């Protein structure tokens, strides 16, 4: 059997926590609690499969428009996660970075976020990029501002230079997974997802298992990633076809 290609960078839009809870007659907050447990399990499994970077869309800039009680619960959940799971990241040698803006995050979240970043900065067994208070358009605006503040001239700005000023200097996304069956990006990693393969399982995130992740890898392996280029076999066939036509015309006129 041909060896599977493992994507270097996998991004996940964590979606369906609230619907998972509603289906079970539970408060929405219970869905977020269940989703957190799934996050930890999937991250560990993905990195064990050979994925090098996991980007997780856990809270967008727009999510602050939700019910205040739900937002407060999520902020408390982040605080609990950053405190409780720091040993998990250390023991598994996982580096944690964050993408997103500070405002209007509570100070306690920012403090623990920064402590976790510092604590794991030298870890080598993969990177978990937590997208918290994140918006793709805002990242592009913030990146542009940083480039202007750095005094770069227009002719000095390339795609490679621009990427260095994003929230995190990470490789492009290879596979983007959004659970719950929704078919949109929702302002997630707009720059980094430029050539990503998209996969939209209908599974609600708390029910997303290691087996479901394997299914995503199988789908990824069936995709033909050309990055704007035609297939090599098609190019060779086309050149051969032109040569045959040319020779046919040549000999027709010669005879």
Image: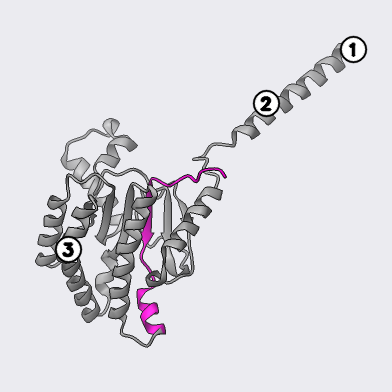
Mark 1 surroundings within 10 Å by alpha-carbon count, few (fewer than 14), some (14 through 19), many (20 or more):
few
Pointers 1 and 3 in contact (C-beta within 8 Å)? no
Which mark's residue is nearer the viewer, 1 or 3? 3
Q: Is residue 23 left or right of residue 230?
A: left
Quarter of the image where one finds residue 44: bottom left
- The answer to whether residue 144 shows anywhere in this view is yes
In the picture of the structure, the residue carrying the numbered disc 2 is 239
Tag 2 or tag 1, which sits nearer the N-term?
2
Is 26 situated above or below 225? below
- Choose between 178 and 94: the one closer to the eye: 94
Q: CA distance from mark 2 to mark 3?
A: 58 Å
The stretch of residues the image draws in magenta is 1-23
Image quarter in which the N terminus is found: top right
In the picture of the structure, the residue carrying the numbered disc 1 is 255
Q: CA distance from mark 1 to mark 3?
A: 82 Å
Q: Is residue 68 left or right of residue 45?
A: left
Tag 3 or tag 2, which sits nearer the N-term?
3
């Amino acid at each position: 059997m041909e060896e599977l290609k493992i994507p270097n960078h996998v991004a996940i839009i964590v979606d369906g926590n609230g619907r998972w809870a509603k289906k079970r007659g539970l408060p929405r907050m219970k869905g977020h609690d269940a989703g957190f447990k799934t996050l930890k399990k999937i991250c560990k499994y993905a990195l064990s499969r050979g994925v090098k970077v996991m980007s997780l869309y856990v809270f967008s800039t727009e999510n602050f428009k939700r019910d205040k009680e739900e937002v407060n619960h999520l902020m408390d959940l982040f605080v609990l996660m950053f405190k409780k799971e720091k040993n998990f990241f250390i023991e598994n040698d996982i580096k944690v970075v964050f993408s997103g803006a500070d405002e209007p995050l509570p100070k306690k979240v920012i403090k623990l976020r920064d402590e976790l970043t510092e604590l794991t900065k030298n870890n080598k067994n993969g990177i978990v990029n937590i997208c918290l208070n994140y918006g793709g358009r805002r990242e592009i605006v913030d990146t542009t501002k940083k480039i202007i503040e750095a005094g770069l001239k227009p002719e000095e700005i390339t795609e490679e230079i621009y990427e260095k000023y994003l929230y995190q200097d990470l490789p492009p996304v290879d596979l983007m997974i959004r659970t719950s069956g929704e078919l949109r990006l929702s302002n997630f990693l707009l720059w980094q997802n430029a050539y990503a393969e998209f996969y939209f399982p209908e599974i609600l995130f708390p029910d997303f298992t290691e087996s479901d992740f394997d299914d995503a890898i199988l789908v990824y392996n069936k995709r033909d990633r050309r990055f704007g280029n035609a297939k090599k076999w098609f190019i060779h066939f086309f050149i051969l076809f032109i040569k045959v036509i040319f020779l046919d015309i040549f000999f027709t006129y010669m005879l």
